[in-house]
Image (cartoon, rainbow, N blue to C red):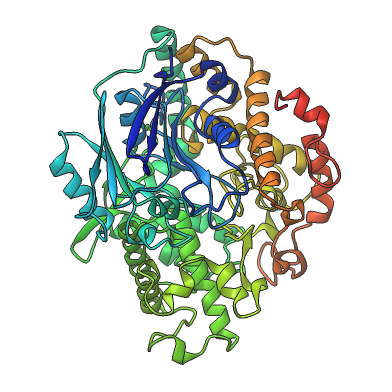
């Protein structure tokens, strides 16, 4: 079974049973794998109206057909479930080496059902699979959990686990693998915690069979060359990591500052990738078979660990008004240890800071640690308290929307479908604003990264301020991203590669004969089944919008001065481009065309 291993692991935590099932290859190919296959299984097996933290929700770990192959960045996997932060379908992507190890062990998918009576972890050694007691691991941070499990497993085992935030059901909790890599958004870590599942440890010694090894080797060589010759993937990301964006985005006037109150920070250089590289970088920290190597391994306070990505530098930096990069790195370390999403965590603190600024949060609620913009010490401490649900941190642990809504000011939550927006002010990038508003998992940049053409001129430069053509661009990027997430590669490859290159790798690995058009149609199919899941879950298409501030308050100064996000112009065009009706629902014709009946 070329590209796929052909086996699904079904783990019933309630009954403590493990079954191996044959992968439906026709279904896998129709939905590619990863994100697409996981969503299809969820649609078939789970009521979209399920309570995300109930035993009836399922938690899926899904690889793609290129995961564990020699393809560049071929180590990605998806965690698919119903997300407790948003109530939408959730599929969180992660890198590192864990996903490839699962594939080497012989599995395409793990499906977790039910809830264990006591904490457990799943131990996989190729064909040998068992549930083990995790009582001694419960309450431990990610680093210690990983270290303890490695003492109980064979050499070269890879570990995916939750930290205290997931155990305490924080709706911002993520799932960490390889210590510092995260399936980060929509609260997937809380779903894992709700099942009393602490970790999945895997050691695989097998190999993914390929349809055309020589053909794949040839295209991999060609595509790796393209990645190394591209300015973003061959120079910017390898040199400074994703943090290279801090100065670029700030200079464009779209770096959200003080909870999106302004769009530039005069101290951006102090929290940039250049500054981190100059003072704190120990070495690059690449994922499995990655020629880009954007991961950073840093040292601070005598401690080494994974360094902050661009989104993290922003969330704990300018969004909180903090200009001290060391405080940002300390908060990042805490998030890795506690297992909490850095974007939602930083943005929730920023929203709390504005509530405090408005006089809505009182000093007596904060136990001597005021939430003032620019207070790096408070930002670090509230990260710790939130991950552990201590004091006021208990209120912040469920994200900015629920926090601000409790004070009657949900308008101060910079979210879509209750998920915090990432590090780009959409008022100065119209396409990115449309992508935010229509994301199938709430506020998200990696479901349609329009920053690529609007700011980075990849694959070509387009006017970031115009609305013309943005519906078409958004659909293309969303569909292509669905493909990349489903095959098992990293989104960053798309700075240099397009549909043709992904098709060539997929065909060589699996023996298929897909065209570019068929591959993109598969991405369209994935996007639409996610939309259908959300509609069945009660997600109103009226949620395809942005916070009031971004729709009504023009940027006050800087290169994006005077702009709002013109969603009212773009959204009807987008619905038409998608083949949806005026209310944002896929038409019968679209459903029929994509084989979603």
Q: Residue at x 79, y 45 (%)?
A: 584
Indicate whether 506 appears above or below 229. above
Q: Residue at x 54, y 84 (%)?
A: 356
Q: Residue at x 84, y 52 (%)?
A: 569
Q: Nearer the viewer, residue 190 or 519?
A: 190
Indicate whether 582 appears above or below 260. above
Residue 456's spot in the image, x, y percent? 59, 44
Q: Is residue 486 in sight in this rendering?
A: yes
Q: Work out which residue is located at the far front of the displayed protein and give it.
A: 15
Indicate whether 486 appears above or below 437. above
Quadrant in which the C terminus appears? top right
Q: Quadrant of residue 579?
A: top right
Q: Quadrant of residue 330?
A: bottom left
Quadrant in which the N terminus appears? top left
Q: Work out which residue is located at the far left of the displayed protein and give it.
A: 151
Residue 563's spot in the image, x, y percent? 75, 63
Q: Work out which residue is located at the far bottom of the displayed protein and give it.
A: 364
Q: Nearer the viewer, residue 424 or 441?
A: 441
């Amino acid at each position: 079974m070329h590209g796929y291993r052909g086996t699904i692991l079904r783990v019933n935590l309630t009954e403590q049973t493990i079954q191996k099932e044959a992968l439906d290859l026709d279904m896998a190919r129709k939905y590619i794998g990863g994100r697409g296959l996981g969503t299809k299984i969820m649609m078939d097996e789970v009521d979209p109206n399920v309570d995300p933290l109930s035993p009836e929700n399922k938690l899926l770990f899904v690889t793609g057909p290129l995961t564990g192959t020699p393809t560049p960045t071929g180590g990605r996997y998806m965690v698919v479930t119903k997300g407790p932060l948003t109530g939408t379908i959730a599929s969180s992507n992660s890198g590192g080496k864990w996903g490839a190890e699962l594939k080497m062990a012989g599995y395409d998918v793990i499906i977790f059902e039910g809830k264990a009576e006591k904490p457990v972890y799943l131990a996989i050694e190729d064909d040998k699979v068992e549930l083990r007691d995790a009582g001694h691991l419960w309450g431990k941070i990610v680093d210690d959990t990983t270290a303890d499990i490695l003492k109980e497993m064979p050499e070269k085992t890879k570990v995916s686990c939750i930290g205290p935030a997931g155990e305490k059901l924080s709706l911002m909790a993520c799932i960490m693998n390889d210590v510092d890599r995260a399936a980060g958004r929509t609260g997937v870590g809380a779903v894992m915690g709700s099942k009393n599942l602490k970790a999945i440890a895997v050691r695989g010694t097998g190999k993914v069979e390929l349809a055309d090894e020589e053909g794949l080797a040839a295209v991999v060589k060609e595509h790796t060359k393209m990645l190394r010759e591209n300015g973003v993937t061959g120079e910017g990301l390898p040199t400074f990591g994703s943090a290279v964006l801090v100065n670029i985005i700030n200079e464009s006037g779209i770096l959200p500052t003080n909870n999106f109150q302004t769009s530039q920070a005069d101290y951006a250089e102090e929290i940039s990738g250049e500054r981190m590289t100059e003072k704190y970088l120990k070495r690059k920290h690449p994922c499995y078979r990655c020629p880009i190597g954007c991961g950073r391994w840093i040292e601070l306070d005598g401690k080494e660990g994974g360094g902050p990505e661009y989104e993290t530098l922003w969330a704990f930096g300018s969004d909180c008004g903090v200009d001290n990069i060391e405080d940002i790195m300390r908060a990042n370390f805490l998030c890795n240890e506690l297992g909490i999403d850095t974007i939602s965590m930083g943005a929730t603190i920023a929203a709390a800071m504005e509530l405090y600024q408005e006089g809505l949060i009182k000093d007596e609620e904060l136990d001597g640690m005021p939430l003032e913009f620019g207070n790096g010490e408070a930002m670090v401490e509230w990260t710790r308290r939130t991950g552990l649900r201590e004091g006021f941190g208990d209120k912040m642990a469920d994200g900015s929307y629920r926090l601000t809504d409790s004070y009657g000011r949900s308008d101060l939550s910079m979210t879509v479908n209750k998920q915090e927006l990432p590090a780009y002010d959409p008022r100065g990038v119209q396409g990115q604003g449309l992508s935010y508003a229509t994301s199938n998992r709430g506020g998200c940049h990696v479901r349609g990264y329009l920053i690529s053409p609007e700011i980075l001129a990849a694959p070509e430069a387009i006017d970031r301020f115009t609305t013309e053509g943005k519906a078409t661009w958004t659909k293309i990027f969303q569909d292509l991203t669905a493909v990349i997430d489903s095959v098992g590669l990293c989104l960053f490859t798309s700075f240099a590669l397009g549909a043709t290159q992904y098709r060539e790798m997929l065909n060589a690995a699996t023996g298929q004969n897909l065209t570019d058009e068929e591959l993109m149609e598969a991405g369209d199919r994935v996007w639409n089944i996610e939309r259908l899941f959300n509609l069945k879950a009660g997600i109103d298409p009226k949620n395809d919008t942005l916070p009031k501030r971004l729709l009504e308050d023009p940027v006050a100064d800087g290169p994006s001065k005077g702009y709002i996000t013109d969603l009212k112009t773009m959204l009807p065009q987008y619905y038409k481009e998608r083949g949806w009706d005026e209310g944002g629902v896929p038409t019968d014709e679209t459903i029929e065309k994509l084989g979603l009946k």
